[in-house]
Amino acid sequence: MDNAPFFVVPDILTAENVFLSIGDKDILNGVTISAQKGSITGMLGRNGAGKSTMLQSVFGVSNSQECDVFHNGVKVRKPYSVNGLLNYLPQKSFLLPGLTLRKIAIQFGVPHQEILDNFPGLKNELDKRVGELSGGMERLFSVLIILLADTRFSLLDEPFSHIMPLYIEQLKTLMLKQKEKKGIIITDHLYRHVLDISDKIYLIKEGKSIYIREKESLMLHGYIRDTWDYPYHTCTIPAP
């Protein structure tokens, strides 16, 4: 028995058959995506394609007509209510303006030192209240709290918006580090950064999810004009 093989069960989150219609318009028409620990799943699409709605559906707070979420094959109702399963970074601010960053970090169970280990420049910001911060600094801290919190999955909607380029590169490094601890789903209109760090890519187009195996497929689907729009990788995007 001591020599019996040891199998590690992948930690997988899947959202299937997501439907959302507004009036006569189908926003999402049977979209399916999956994410797992150890990888970053990128989700791309034009404005209004339904990317934010898709993340809200996975989290369990959207008004989609249908959405089935599974964790390791077990259906989950109200995913947001399952302790430690997932958290979600919305586009809008969610931090209370009267609280200090130090207090918010405590509420989310994120050690102050872990924040400073990754972003030492925030040392003088921790005792400031949210209302005293610039929009970019507030956004940066919001992303850090979600990424560093102890959950199995993190859903990130526009994490690079309004953030300085230097901090964006540091965030990408942190995301690559954190994916060893959790699965990450990310969408951002700054798509080059999404492509740069993602292990797999979905394109949301005309209400459907298209798995992108090669960056050239983004050109074929009209998302980018040519491969010069995507200067980072020359390799094939890995299969899930």
Image (spheres, helix red, strand yellow):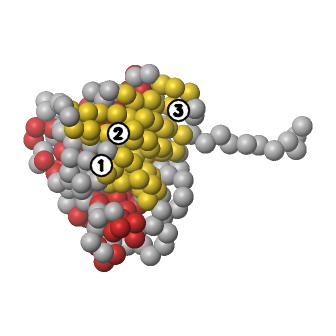
Which badge, 1 or 3, is on the more N-terminal residue? 3
Q: Which amino acid type is shown beneath numbered disc 3?
A: His
Q: Label 2: few (<14), some or many (≥20) within 10 Å?
A: some
Distance, label 1 to label 2, CA atoms, is: 8 Å
Q: Nearer the viewer, residue 186 or 214?
A: 214
Distance, label 1 to label 3, CA atoms, is: 27 Å
Residue 137 lies, in percent from the top left, at 18, 49
In percent of the image, x 31 and y 51: which residue is there? 205
In the rendered structure, find residue 29 and report the number of the disc placed on it: 2
In percent of the image, x 53 and y 45: which residue is there? 37
Image height check: is 220 above or below 128?
Answer: below
Quadrant in the picture for residue 16: top left
Residue behind mark 3: 71
Image height check: is 152 above or below 189?
Answer: above
Q: Which amino acid type is shown beneath numbered disc 1?
A: Glu
Disc nearest the viewer among 2 and 3: 2
